[in-house]
Image (tube, grey):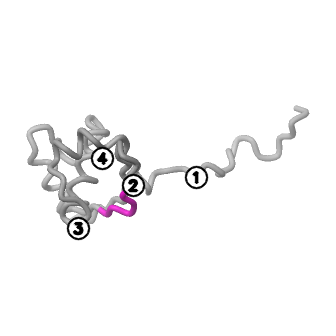
Amino acid sequence: MTAVKGKFSARFEDGTVLSDIESDQRDLAAFELQPFGAPFHEMHKVIFTSMRWLAWHAAKRAGLTKLAWEKWDATCVEVTDLESEVPDDAADPGQRGRSDAT
């Protein structure tokens, strides 16, 4: 069976940030059962809902939030997938070796 883990950060309207929220297969399985959920192989069709819900479910399971899903969804401004994020200072590989003169 596939082990699937994710790491998220969530930012809320009041400026609160929850970092290092770790989801795992338990959260994915629970998402698939939601009325708005989707099987794992189709999660790309609901990418923002799935990221937000997985972050919420993992945070709730870990005791990082007591918010119900509806309140979390209404007040959470942004969820970031920390494992897919490209650092701001990452070099563009297509630009290596080019000078400003060219």
Is residue 21 found inside the magenta-colored segment of the image? Answer: yes
Q: Residues within 10 Å of mark 3 (few under 14, many from 20)?
A: few
Residue 66 appears in the rendering: yes
Residue receiving disc 4 = 51
Whole-angstrom CA distance, mark 1 to mark 4, is 19 Å
Q: Earlier in the sequence, mark 4 or mark 2?
A: 2
Identified by mark 1, the residue type is Pro
Q: Earlier in the sequence, mark 1 or mark 3?
A: 3
Say which element carries label 4: helix
Front one among 52 and 91: 52
Residue receiving disc 2 = 17
Closer to the camera: disc 1 or disc 2? 2
Q: Residues within 10 Å of mark 2 (few under 14, many from 20)?
A: some
Left or right of 86, for residue 84: left
Whole-angstrom CA distance, mark 3 to mark 2, is 15 Å
Q: Residues within 10 Å of mark 4 (few under 14, many from 20)?
A: many
Residue receiving disc 1 = 87
Residue 42 appears in the rendering: no
Residue receiving disc 3 = 62
Whether pointer 4 and pointer 2 mark residues with C-beta atoms closer than 8 Å, the reply is no
Say which element carries label 2: strand
Whole-angstrom CA distance, mark 1 to mark 2, is 18 Å
Q: Which residue lies most toward the front here?
A: 14
Q: Earlier in the sequence, mark 4 or mark 3?
A: 4
Where does residue 94 sit, x and y in percent of width and height? Answer: 70, 41
**Range of magenta residues:** 18-22
Residue at horizontal 86 percent and vertical 36 percent from the top: 100
Residue at horizontal 26 percent and vertical 36 percent from the top: 46
Q: Earlier in the sequence, mark 3 or mark 2?
A: 2
Q: Earlier in the sequence, mark 1 or mark 4?
A: 4
Say which element carries label 3: loop
